[in-house]
């Protein structure tokens, strides 16, 4: 058994109170850094790792016990401690706990596997990949016992009616779709976060394991009908596309250490990534847009040179440009920062260079289901009228004005207001062309 001080720390790690668990983790980290006393005593280290395994394999029913064992084991591993037998036992236990009923235990198990990958290399991923990918794949589709009964129950709760009319049949369909689109998806999010932890743990060495099968699985999540699944998918995608570089965390503008261009899997599959990044940057849900914005910044910072970035600008640049005016503040500020980091002072020149793609995207966004997207599209069209050279925009004035006129009929007054401002800009800058628009 571990000494009394360590036993007290382990008790804190397994506490029902989060503050006490955090305090226990902090105390354990301090204890493990005491190389002159604690970690130099082989017996104490062995006792501690045995105690951690006991916590991880506990069957007392309290999830805090398993969670405490996992978080303690993660700290233990990251301090470069633990025998090979300990690590292998922990790997097997963590894989089992990926299916635990408590989400926090599932997340902690993924973090342990990520820590093992960080310290032991990609061999841990090879040993775990089949189980992890199978877990993600199985959870991508919800299996409801009876979707019709679930939908009928939702309608009954909302309306209080018992007899089903034609109108209520329509309501039942809508209720089922709302449930499908917005509810959580059991273990899917934690399974994908586990995969994300493993990818981050492997670092650049994971590059050789980026296969089309893995990408198809991730892209399936990005196409998912449920917004939470799409958001988690883009968070995973952000970790994946950042593997091509190793950047100094203290400065986002520092030079990156790149993987060889010929072996860079992100660049090799760049066309697929750019297609899905554009899709995420155009999503109707702000949280998905933000996750896709993070992935987009990581993607462009991973690319090795200016030429490789410009290869993907026609697809992604218009969406990045529009999100600088998006109503949701988090998306807007992050997009403005990304724009400065990626295009610098070349923004106007690049928009003019890809003006056809930009105009087509802006017009498509004026027809989006989300009023915030339509408002941002009108604001961006207004910006085109005042900041882009008239010669590059002249041939597109007619179609842009038609889109703005359509927005005059919008149900949302901020969209109508933005459309009015944009039309005013175009009338001032292109008086002749505006007269020809009916």
Image (spheres, rainbow, N blue to C red):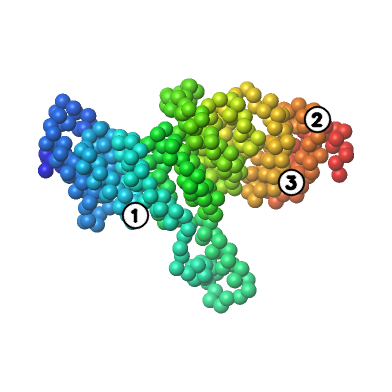
Which residue carries the number 3 mark? 407
Residue 394, image x, y percentages = 80, 32
**To which residue does mark 1 refer?**
99
* Foreground residue among 254 and 388: 254
Q: Residues within 10 Å of mark 2 (few under 14, many from 20)?
A: some
- Residue at image location 22% in from the left, 29% down from the top: 33
Q: Secondary structure at mark 3?
A: helix
Q: From this viewpoint, is residue 329 visible?
A: no
Which mark, residue 161? none
Which of disc 1 and disc 2 is earlier in sequence? 1
Which residue is pictured at 56% across the width and 77% down the height?
A: 163
Q: Residue furthest front?
A: 262
Tell me the number on the disc at residue 429: 2
Q: Nearer the viewer, residue 134 or 60?
A: 134
Between discs 1 and 3, the one toward the N terminus: 1
Left or right of 135? Residue 228 is: right
- Between marks 1 and 3 in the image, the one whose residue lies nearer the viewer: 1
Asked if the residue at tag 1 contacts the one at tag 2, i.e. Cβ–Cβ closer than 8 Å, the answer is no
Quarter of the image for the N terminus: give it.
top left
178 relative to 119 in the view: left or right? right
Relative to residue 61, is residue 385 depicted above or below?
A: above
Percent position of residue 420, x then y: 75, 40
């Amino acid at each position: 058994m571990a000494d009394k001080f360590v036993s007290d720390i382990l008790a804190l790690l397994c506490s029902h109170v989060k503050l006490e668990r955090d305090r226990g983790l902090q105390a354990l980290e301090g204890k493990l850094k005491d190389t002159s006393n604690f970690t130099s005593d082989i017996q104490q280290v062995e006792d501690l790792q045995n105690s951690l395994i006991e916590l991880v394999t506990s069957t007392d029913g309290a999830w805090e016990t398993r969670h405490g064992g996992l978080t303690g084991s993660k700290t233990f591993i990251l301090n470069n401690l633990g025998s090979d037998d300990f690590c292998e036992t922990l790997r097997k236990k963590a894989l089992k706990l990926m299916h635990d009923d408590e989400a926090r235990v599932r997340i902690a198990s993924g973090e342990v596997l990520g820590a093992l990958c960080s310290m032991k290399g990609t061999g841990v991923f090879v040993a775990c990949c089949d189980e992890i990918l199978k877990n993600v794949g199985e959870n991508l589709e919800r299996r409801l016992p009876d979707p019709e009964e679930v939908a009928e129950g939702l309608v009954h709760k909302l309306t209080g009616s018992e007899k089903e009319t034609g109108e209520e049949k329509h309501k039942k369909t809508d209720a089922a779709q709302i449930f499908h689109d917005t509810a959580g998806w059991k273990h899917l999010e934690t399974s994908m976060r586990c995969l994300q932890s493993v990818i981050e743990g492997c670092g650049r060495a994971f590059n050789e394991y980026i296969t089309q099968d893995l990408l198809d699985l991730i892209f399936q999540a990005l196409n998912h009908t449920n917004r939470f699944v799409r958001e988690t998918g883009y968070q995973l995608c952000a970790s994946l596309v950042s593997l091509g570089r190793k950047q100094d965390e203290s400065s986002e503008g520092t030079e990156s250490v790149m993987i060889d261009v010929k072996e860079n899997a992100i660049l090799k599959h760049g066309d697929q990534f750019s297609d899905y990044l554009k899709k995420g940057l155009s999503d109707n849900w702000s949280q998905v847009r933000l996750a896709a914005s993070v992935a987009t910044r990581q993607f462009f910072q991973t690319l090795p040179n200016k030429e490789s970035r410009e290869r993907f600008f026609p697809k992604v640049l218009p969406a990045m440009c529009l999100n600088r005016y998006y109503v949701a503040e988090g998306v807007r500020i992050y997009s403005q920062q990304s724009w400065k980091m990626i295009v610098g002072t070349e923004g106007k020149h690049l928009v003019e260079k890809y003006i056809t793609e930009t105009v087509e995207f802006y017009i498509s966004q004026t027809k989006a289901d989300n009023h915030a997207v339509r408002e941002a599209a009108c604001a961006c069209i207004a910006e085109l009228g005042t900041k882009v050279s008239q010669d590059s925009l002249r041939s597109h004035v007619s179609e842009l004005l038609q889109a703005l006129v359509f927005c005059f009929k919008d149900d949302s007054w901020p969209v109508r207001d933005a459309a009015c401002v944009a039309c005013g800009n175009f009338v001032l800058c292109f008086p002749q062309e505006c007269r020809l628009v009916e």
